[in-house]
């Protein structure tokens, strides 16, 4: 019943879907960037610029959503939940941008091939965010939404495991202390992308459970 009667005032779901699509693109670009570093392909600067562009686009969507929130009388679900959802989504792209900025800041020229696997998990998590947000316009999608949220949780656990493996290998095998410090920072930020995705999944899950 809730799904059929959900208020449609404003463009909230359009904003959510636009932002989520940018997150999915950001995850794909992040994987390309890490792969470029692993292969020393020379594409890192271009990919970093693309990530910056996406982050700026996402900021605009966030601001438009919050502006809509201030002028809407009717909202599809609780105002605090809308605020938490769009800001949480924005955090994901902020962290993706942090990875590319850290690569430039620390002048990282190469990264171990094993880091690509962690980037691929973050990309899958970003794709899951896009998928789950697309279903939010109807609470009749509740069971499917909760399934995807669970999968996002699992991807975060997978990222944790890969992060621990990368850190262990780094401390055991890298003789250059400066490189250890640089890569440690990048690994930690990279892994935190999935943490932010898990946070958004938690917000989505709460919305479903409270409104279905």
Image (cartoon, grey):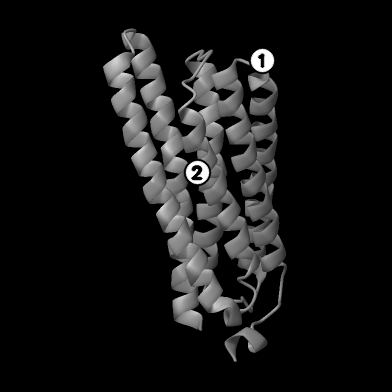
x then y, percent, for residue 123: 56, 44
Say above or below: 4 vs 146: below
Residue at (33% x, 32% y) in the render: 165
Residue at (44% x, 71% y) in the render: 206
CA separation, marks 1 and 2?
23 Å
* Disc 2, SS: helix
Q: Residues within 10 Å of mark 2 (few under 14, many from 20)?
A: many
Residue at (58% x, 34% y) in the render: 31
Horizontal side, residue 154 vs residue 51: left or right: left
**In the image, which disc is placed on residue 121?**
2
Tally of marks: 2
Residue at (34% x, 16% y) in the render: 180
CB under 8 Å between discs 1 and 2? no
**In the image, which disc is placed on residue 191?**
none
Q: Residue furthest top?
A: 176
Is residue 199 something one can see in this rendering? no
Is residue 41 something one can see in this rendering? yes
Say above or below: 10 vs 60: below
Q: Residues within 10 Å of mark 1 (few under 14, many from 20)?
A: few
Which one is in front, 212 or 126?
Answer: 126
Q: Which residue is mark 1?
A: 42
Which image quarter: residue 172? top left
Say above or below: 171 vs 149: above
Quarter of the picture containing the N terminus is: bottom right
x then y, percent, for residue 30: 59, 34
x then y, percent, for residue 105: 50, 17
Horizontal side, residue 148 vs residue 10: left or right: left
* Disc 1, SS: loop
Dot placed on the residue nearer the N-terminal end, 1 or 2: 1
Which image quarter: residue 69? bottom right
Which one is in front, 178 or 168?
Answer: 168
């Amino acid at each position: 019943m809730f799904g059929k009667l959900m208020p449609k005032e404003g463009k909230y779901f359009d904003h959510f879907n636009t932002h989520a699509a940018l997150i999915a693109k950001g995850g794909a670009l992040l994987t390309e960037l890490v792969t470029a570093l692993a292969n020393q392909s020379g594409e890192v600067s271009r990919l970093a610029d693309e990530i910056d562009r996406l982050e700026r686009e996402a900021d605009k969507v966030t601001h438009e959503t919050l502006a809509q929130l201030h002028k809407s009388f009717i909202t599809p679900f609780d105002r605090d939940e809308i605020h938490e959802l769009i800001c949480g989504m924005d955090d994901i792209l902020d962290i993706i941008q942090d990875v590319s900025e850290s690569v430039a800041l620390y002048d990282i020229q190469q990264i171990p091939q094993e880091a690509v696997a962690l980037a691929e998990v973050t990309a899958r998590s970003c794709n899951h965010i896009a998928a789950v947000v697309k279903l939010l316009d109807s609470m009749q999608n509740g069971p499917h939404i909760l399934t995807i949220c669970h999968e996002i949780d699992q991807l975060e656990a997978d990222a944790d495991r890969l992060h621990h493996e990368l850190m262990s290998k780094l401390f055991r095998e890298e003789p250059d202390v400066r490189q250890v410090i640089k890569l440690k920072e990048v690994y930690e930020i990279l892994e935190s992308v999935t943490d932010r995705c898990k946070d958004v999944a938690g917000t989505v899950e709460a919305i479903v459970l409270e409104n279905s």
